[in-house]
Amino acid sequence: MRNILGKIWKFVKKVSLPDAIFVTAILIIITIPNIMLNKKQYELVEKRPLAKMPKLIVNGKINKEFGKQFENFYNDNFWQRNTCIDKNLAIKGFINGRMEGYLEIEGQNGCLFYKGDDSVANYKNKVLFSDMELLRIKHNLDILNVWCNKNGIKLIVVIPPDKNRVYGEYFPKHIKKVNPKSRVELLREYMSKNSDIEIIYPIEQMYARKKHDSEPLYYYTDTHWTPVGAYVAYNEIIKQINKSYPYVKTLDYHKLDSTRMTFKERFGRNGDGADNLKTDDYDIKYLFYKDSKNYNPAKYDLKVAIIGDSFSGELLFWMGKSFDVNRYLYNEKVELFVDFSMKLWEDKVLSYNPDILIVEFVERYAYKLLDLYKD
Amino acid sequence: MLFSSMVFIFVFLPIVAILYYISPRRFRNLILLVSSIIFYAWGEPVYVFIMLATILINYIGAIIVDKIKVMPYKRLALTLTILADLSILFYFKYFNFFAQNINKYLHGNIDFIHVIMPIGISFYTFQAISYVADVFTGEVKAQRNIEKLALFITFFPQLIAGPIVKYHDICEQIENRRETIKDFILGLKRFIIGLSKKIIIANTLAEIADAIFSTGTNEYGILVAWLGIITYTLQIYFDFSGYSDMAIGLGRMFGFKILENFNFPYVSKTITEFWRRWHISLSTWFKLYLYIPLGGNRCSLKRNCFNILVVFLATGFWHGAAWVFILWGAWYGVFLVIEKITGLAKKELTHTQSILAHIYTLSVVIIGWVFFRSESLSAALGYISSMFDFSTLVSSFFELGEYLDNYKILMIVSGIIGSTGVMKNITEFGEVNNLRKSVVNIYLIALFLWCWSCLAASTYNPFIYFRF
């Protein structure tokens, strides 16, 4: 030991003090990620399982993928990974005067917006549906409608507006629209001229609601709509249901009990945007509703099936107050959204035997209507 | 494996360095060779056998070339060895390109082959050719020890992205080198500088350039088009020269002195000067092993111009199997020929002329990068037309904000300053006294920490479907 220390000392003596400190500092930094490896199996913020340590020998053969797999494992599990990511975002946010991550962008007044899945391009009305695409969507919806009619089901198509569409005033100012109309507006116009199928895209209703009510329609730190925002769409859905079932009445949300809570108090986290950007909740309290002893209207004898994305969650709450509802998240069926096809869901829906089928895609995923029925 | 990966910096490099320095000298080449093979095989283990085949071909080929004394046979042995090297390169890199063009223009019916191009094949093939060519000219003796030849070809610091080391530059160091602590520290500092160039500047600018180049040319205006190509111009320099810095630094950490590959090319006043400063190891390789054998400049002006064009068409084709790369090479070839004919490269310039010459050179280089970056010729021409579409001047001003933020602007400014040579030799600046050294060292530690943070952030990989 003394011999080794002696060698190290001899070695150190050959360099200047600043260089000795430099090398020591770099050695410490290089050691830090290896002090211990993460023992977590799941990353809550990224919402994915972390890569596991691969085996060099698999089924008696050398694992050819070992290098890539080990790299994935190391990238997921080195010590202080989350701290590094947080600091990186924080420093960039400090320099920029606003936060921006891989999937989120901070707008005015700290309002967070999702920027993945071409949300920004969609906001800019950059990618529009061509005439052929509009025809194809109409064709797909016609097929779906025929199938629904054949099975005694009423079809309702809902497209919740993106948050940036409703709260555009909070979206980063430098992002400008390049076309006056969005592809969903074009689609709605096209369908109203060429089809009996009416698409619910409650943007005007959202604007109207914003005008006379300060209650947030979307969460500040998350991309989703609040129960109040979902209620606006629910209202429009009931109007469509009334065309076939005039006796159905809209639930009066004023009569429900409500409570005010922050996003964190309600969901135990800060919202998708805040979680990704590692920021804290903004202490904004939203209205959440629950059953009331004084107001508990009986459910109608109608069954509703909803195929949709995460926005259908709040719809489920409202629809579930009046109907027997089954909800299907369409990504449960297929791993890639592009492979979404109505054919995959027909048996499941029929086994439930609903009276009403709601197909829902949030605005940024409206293009999935193109794949509703593949050739 | 990439130098700019967590696993290389925090696992592979420390392990190799420790093993190297605790081992007796006689095992050090072997440790580097084994490490290099692991480094190469990390992502695609199968392709390591192609590299080993290249080593074997050139090992045997060079011994035969060395042994044969009769010139025509010696030349034949050299030709066959080079042909074998180029055949492997052709098969993996160029076969599908030729098949596609023969099918398209000559109505052929050649099936495509389903191969992935082995990483670094263009670099190590050229190194191997340089070895056997040096043996042919008698500049070096054929290496009888295959371990040493294998180390020359596989040495991990320069294996996948150069610099293209010529055998005669490094054979002595493989045989007999002395590592010093001073070299180790200088190498480490150079590595950190290269890593910072790649991670901090190039990767940030790549975000802008990629976003703009992936957008249709009719969707943005003149200023955005210029922003895209300027950021790409800086990105490619910082990416490539950063990689070369890392390679040179790593080499030095293990006692090797690898020649410089970049010398602030964007300060050039002529295209001739640019190619003396850009990817120097490749330019030198082509000069030694193609330009001079073709006759170089010791011939008529007409023949000289032909030689230049051939070399630059080959340079373009070396960069990639696509017409845009050939065009990119031809683009430079034409300007080099013009400079040769006009004598511009040798002219003494006044201050004003220097400024104009600099503008001319940068314009040629920047437009050249459009061909290099574009997917197709039509995309390149579309992009160039947006660069000169003045009708979009005002509207595109407002689009800039979409691609820029304070951090990115800071990186662009740093990139411009860094590419001019103002910050040249930061480590030499630190060698003057301990105070300066301390300042430089603190700066480098900060850079390294920021690189680590950026690398960590790049591992952030949220499941994008989680919104469902």
Image (cartoon, coloured by chain):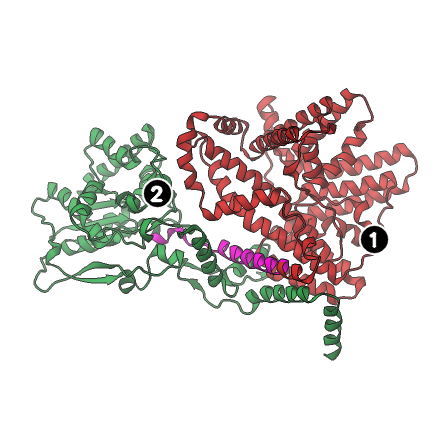
Supply the letter of whichever chain is red.
B
Residue B454 on the magenta span = yes
Direction bottom: furthest residue: A2
Characterize the magenta stretch by its predominant secondary structure: helix
Horizontal side, residue A152 vs residue B278: left or right: left
* Front residue (pair A359, B407): B407
Residue A297, percent from left and from top: 9, 57
Residue B356, percent from left and from top: 62, 28
* Front residue (pair B379, B179): B179
* Front residue (pair A175, B56): A175
Looking at the rendered image, the quarter that the C terminus of chain A falls into is: top left
The residue carrying mark 1 is: B145
Residue B287, quarter of the rendered image: top right
- Magenta stretch in the rendered image: B440-468
Q: Nearer the viewer, mark 2 or mark 1?
A: 2
Compared to residue A139, the image places residue B416 above or below, namely below
The residue carrying mark 2 is: A173
Residue A60 makes an appearance in the image: no
Horizontal side, residue B278 vs residue B82: left or right: left
Q: Amino acid at mark 1?
A: Asn
